[in-house]
Protein backbone atom coordinates (compact mmCIF):
# COMPACT_ATOMS: atom_id res chain seq x y z
CA UNK A 1 0.00 0.00 0.00
CA UNK A 2 1.59 3.30 -1.07
CA UNK A 3 1.81 6.06 1.47
CA UNK A 4 2.73 9.73 1.46
CA UNK A 5 4.18 11.99 4.12
CA UNK A 6 2.24 15.16 4.59
CA UNK A 7 4.36 17.75 6.34
CA UNK A 8 1.55 20.21 6.55
CA UNK A 9 -0.25 17.98 9.01
CA UNK A 10 2.77 17.63 11.21
CA UNK A 11 3.87 21.28 10.90
CA UNK A 12 0.83 23.39 10.10
CA UNK A 13 1.60 26.30 7.79
CA UNK A 14 -0.95 28.84 6.77
CA UNK A 15 0.80 29.91 3.58
CA UNK A 16 2.82 28.13 1.01
CA UNK A 17 6.55 28.85 1.07
CA UNK A 18 8.04 29.76 -2.27
CA UNK A 19 11.54 30.76 -3.17
CA UNK A 20 11.44 32.80 -6.31
CA UNK A 21 14.44 34.84 -7.48
CA UNK A 22 12.99 35.73 -10.86
CA UNK A 23 11.82 39.25 -9.87
CA UNK A 24 15.38 40.07 -8.76
CA UNK A 25 16.85 39.09 -12.11
CA UNK A 26 14.35 41.16 -14.08
CA UNK A 27 15.67 44.37 -12.49
CA UNK A 28 17.91 46.64 -14.57
CA UNK A 29 21.61 45.76 -14.48
CA UNK A 30 22.49 48.92 -12.51
CA UNK A 31 20.28 47.81 -9.60
CA UNK A 32 21.83 44.37 -9.54
CA UNK A 33 25.39 45.76 -9.69
CA UNK A 34 24.72 48.38 -7.01
CA UNK A 35 23.32 45.65 -4.76
CA UNK A 36 26.52 43.65 -5.31
CA UNK A 37 28.69 46.67 -4.54
CA UNK A 38 26.70 47.43 -1.40
CA UNK A 39 27.03 43.84 -0.24
CA UNK A 40 30.79 43.91 -0.87
CA UNK A 41 31.21 47.13 1.10
CA UNK A 42 29.19 45.82 4.02
CA UNK A 43 31.18 42.61 4.20
CA UNK A 44 34.59 44.21 3.82
CA UNK A 45 34.07 47.33 5.91
CA UNK A 46 36.43 47.05 8.84
CA UNK A 47 38.02 49.93 10.68
CA UNK A 48 41.45 50.90 9.43
CA UNK A 49 44.06 51.45 12.08
CA UNK A 50 47.50 52.90 11.61
CA UNK A 51 50.39 50.53 12.14
CA UNK A 52 52.51 52.75 14.37
CA UNK A 53 56.12 51.60 14.57
CA UNK A 54 58.21 52.92 17.45
CA UNK A 55 61.48 54.56 16.44
CA UNK A 56 62.71 55.24 19.96
CA UNK A 57 62.42 57.55 22.91
CA UNK A 58 64.09 60.90 23.47
CA UNK A 59 65.84 61.98 26.66
CA UNK A 60 62.79 64.10 27.53
CA UNK A 61 60.50 61.03 27.50
CA UNK A 62 58.94 61.53 24.08
CA UNK A 63 58.29 58.33 22.15
CA UNK A 64 58.23 58.77 18.38
CA UNK A 65 56.13 56.51 16.14
CA UNK A 66 55.88 56.38 12.36
CA UNK A 67 53.34 54.77 10.03
CA UNK A 68 55.37 53.34 7.17
CA UNK A 69 52.18 52.58 5.20
CA UNK A 70 51.67 56.33 4.71
CA UNK A 71 55.04 57.01 3.06
CA UNK A 72 54.62 58.79 -0.30
CA UNK A 73 57.70 59.69 -2.33
CA UNK A 74 57.94 62.22 -5.16
CA UNK A 75 61.44 62.84 -6.43
CA UNK A 76 63.66 64.01 -3.56
CA UNK A 77 60.67 64.59 -1.25
CA UNK A 78 58.83 62.12 0.97
CA UNK A 79 55.73 62.52 3.15
CA UNK A 80 54.84 60.38 6.16
CA UNK A 81 52.53 60.36 9.21
CA UNK A 82 54.32 60.62 12.55
CA UNK A 83 53.02 60.38 16.12
CA UNK A 84 54.72 62.02 19.10
CA UNK A 85 53.65 60.52 22.44
CA UNK A 86 54.65 62.44 25.59
CA UNK A 87 54.94 61.14 29.16
CA UNK A 88 54.67 64.64 30.61
CA UNK A 89 51.92 67.09 29.64
CA UNK A 90 53.14 69.55 27.01
CA UNK A 91 51.92 73.13 26.67
CA UNK A 92 51.51 75.24 23.54
CA UNK A 93 49.92 78.65 23.98
CA UNK A 94 46.73 77.87 25.95
CA UNK A 95 46.65 74.16 25.09
CA UNK A 96 47.97 71.25 27.18
CA UNK A 97 48.37 67.99 25.28
CA UNK A 98 49.85 64.48 25.63
CA UNK A 99 50.28 63.51 21.97
CA UNK A 100 50.59 65.04 18.53
CA UNK A 101 50.01 63.53 15.08
CA UNK A 102 51.88 65.17 12.25
CA UNK A 103 52.00 64.91 8.47
CA UNK A 104 55.70 65.45 7.84
CA UNK A 105 57.57 66.20 4.64
CA UNK A 106 61.22 65.23 4.28
CA UNK A 107 63.77 66.53 1.80
CA UNK A 108 65.85 63.44 1.07
CA UNK A 109 68.60 65.36 -0.76
CA UNK A 110 69.25 68.12 1.79
CA UNK A 111 68.44 66.28 5.07
CA UNK A 112 65.73 68.61 6.30
CA UNK A 113 62.05 68.33 7.27
CA UNK A 114 58.89 70.32 7.91
CA UNK A 115 55.58 69.60 9.64
CA UNK A 116 52.84 70.17 7.11
CA UNK A 117 49.98 69.64 9.57
CA UNK A 118 50.16 68.93 13.30
CA UNK A 119 47.14 67.84 15.38
CA UNK A 120 47.34 68.04 19.19
CA UNK A 121 45.37 65.53 21.34
CA UNK A 122 44.42 65.44 25.02
CA UNK A 123 45.37 61.77 25.56
CA UNK A 124 48.29 59.54 24.64
CA UNK A 125 48.68 57.83 21.23
CA UNK A 126 46.53 60.35 19.36
CA UNK A 127 43.43 59.56 21.41
CA UNK A 128 41.11 61.88 23.25
CA UNK A 129 39.88 65.27 22.26
CA UNK A 130 41.42 67.18 19.36
CA UNK A 131 42.67 70.35 21.05
CA UNK A 132 44.44 72.33 18.35
CA UNK A 133 45.99 72.13 14.90
CA UNK A 134 48.85 74.00 13.31
CA UNK A 135 50.83 74.14 10.11
CA UNK A 136 54.56 74.52 9.69
CA UNK A 137 54.52 74.93 5.92
CA UNK A 138 57.72 76.51 4.57
CA UNK A 139 59.50 76.17 7.93
CA UNK A 140 62.24 73.71 7.02
CA UNK A 141 64.40 72.42 9.88
CA UNK A 142 67.81 70.74 9.58
CA UNK A 143 68.21 67.15 10.73
CA UNK A 144 71.00 66.44 13.20
CA UNK A 145 72.74 63.07 12.77
CA UNK A 146 71.85 60.40 15.34
CA UNK A 147 68.60 62.10 16.42
CA UNK A 148 65.07 60.70 16.25
CA UNK A 149 64.44 63.13 13.38
CA UNK A 150 67.31 61.44 11.55
CA UNK A 151 65.69 58.01 12.10
CA UNK A 152 62.39 59.38 10.71
CA UNK A 153 64.20 60.89 7.72
CA UNK A 154 65.96 57.56 6.99
CA UNK A 155 62.64 55.67 7.15
CA UNK A 156 60.78 58.15 4.92
CA UNK A 157 63.58 58.44 2.36
CA UNK A 158 64.40 54.72 2.30
CA UNK A 159 67.97 55.23 3.53
CA UNK A 160 69.86 52.55 5.48
Image: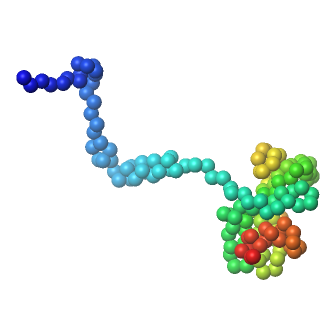
Locate residue 118: give its quadrant: bottom right
Residue 150's spot in the image, x, y percent? 83, 71
Residue 138's spot in the image, x, y percent? 83, 70
Asked if residue 29 shows in the view, the reply is yes
**Rendered position, 99 above or below 106:** above
**Rendered position, 139 above or below 67:** below
Quadrant placement of the N terminus:
top left
Q: Is residue 33 left or right of residue 6?
A: right
Q: Residue at x 25, y 19 (%)?
A: 10
Q: Residue at x 73, y 74 (%)?
A: 157
Q: Nearer the viewer, residue 61 or 90?
A: 61
Q: Is residue 31 left or right of residue 111?
A: left
Q: Nearer the viewer, residue 117 or 40?
A: 40
Q: Residue at x 69, y 67 (%)?
A: 71
Taking the view exactly as shown, the residue that stands out farthest to the left is: 1
Q: Is residue 32 left or right of residue 127?
A: left
Q: Is residue 132 left or right of residue 19?
A: right
Q: Nearer the viewer, residue 82 or 64?
A: 64
Taking the view exactly as shown, the residue that stands out farthest to the bottom is: 109
Quadrant placement of the C terminus:
bottom right
Residue 139's spot in the image, x, y percent? 85, 69
Locate residue 148: give its quadrant: bottom right
Residue 73's spot in the image, x, y percent? 68, 73
Asked if residue 133 shows in the view, the reply is no
Q: How many marks?
A: 0
Q: Residue at x 29, y 42 (%)?
A: 21
Amino acid sequence: MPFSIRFFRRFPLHRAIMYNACPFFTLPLTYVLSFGILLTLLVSSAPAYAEWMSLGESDAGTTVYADSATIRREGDRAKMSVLFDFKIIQAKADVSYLSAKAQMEYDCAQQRFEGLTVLYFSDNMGNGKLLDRSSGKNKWLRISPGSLDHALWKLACGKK
